[in-house]
Amino acid sequence: MSEAATIRYQPLESSSVPERELLSFVSAVTELLGNEQTTVLTEIWLDELASMEAMPEPTSTQWRLVTLGAWARLARRLFDVRLFGDCP
């Protein structure tokens, strides 16, 4: 993939912690896998957020746990695709 084809999402300084976490997750994965899956990546991150028992405070470092969980969900999906040829 060419450098010009990669969209980079730069969180603004004024962005909230949740926005920065979501944008950094999407940016990192699109850098690795390409821009085609940005909607799916956002859904994965939001699904992980929805699965949490309690919503982190707006400025909490606990938002990083959402991103880590999203990475784990993505890894499971990629593993399933590699083994079974499709996501469940």
Image (spheres, rainbow, N blue to C red):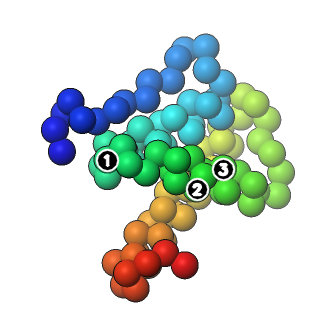
The foreground one among 19 and 38 is 38
User: Which residue reaches farthest right?
Assistant: 54
The foreground one among 41 and 11 is 41
In this rendering, the answer to whether 49 lies above or below 10 is below
The numbered disc on residue 51 is none
CB-based contact (under 8 Å), mark 1 and mark 3:
no
What whole-number distance in Å separates the C-alpha atoms at marks 1 and 3?
A: 20 Å
The mark closer to the camera, 1 or 3, is: 1
The numbered disc on residue 44 is 2
The C terminus, quarter of image: bottom right
Q: Amino acid at mark 2?
A: Ile
Say which label, 1 or 3, has the lower sequence index.
1
Residue visible at 46% across and 45% down in the picture? 38
User: Which residue reaches farthest left?
Assistant: 2
What whole-number distance in Å separates the C-alpha atoms at marks 2 and 3?
A: 6 Å
Is residue 68 visible to us here?
Answer: no
The numbered disc on residue 46 is 3
Is residue 32 visible to us here?
Answer: yes
For residue 51, which quarter of the picture?
bottom right
Q: Amino acid at mark 1?
A: Gly
Q: Which residue is labeled 1 in the image?
A: 34
Q: Amino acid at mark 3?
A: Leu
**Residue 47, horizontal then vertical, whole percent:** 67, 57
- Residue neighbourhood size for the residue with mark 3, other residues' Cα within 10 Å, grouped as few (<14), some (14–19), many (≥20): some
**Residue 15, horizontal then vertical, whole percent:** 61, 20
For residue 53, which quarter of the picture?
bottom right
In this rendering, the answer to whether 82 lies above or below 19 is below
CB-based contact (under 8 Å), mark 2 and mark 3:
yes
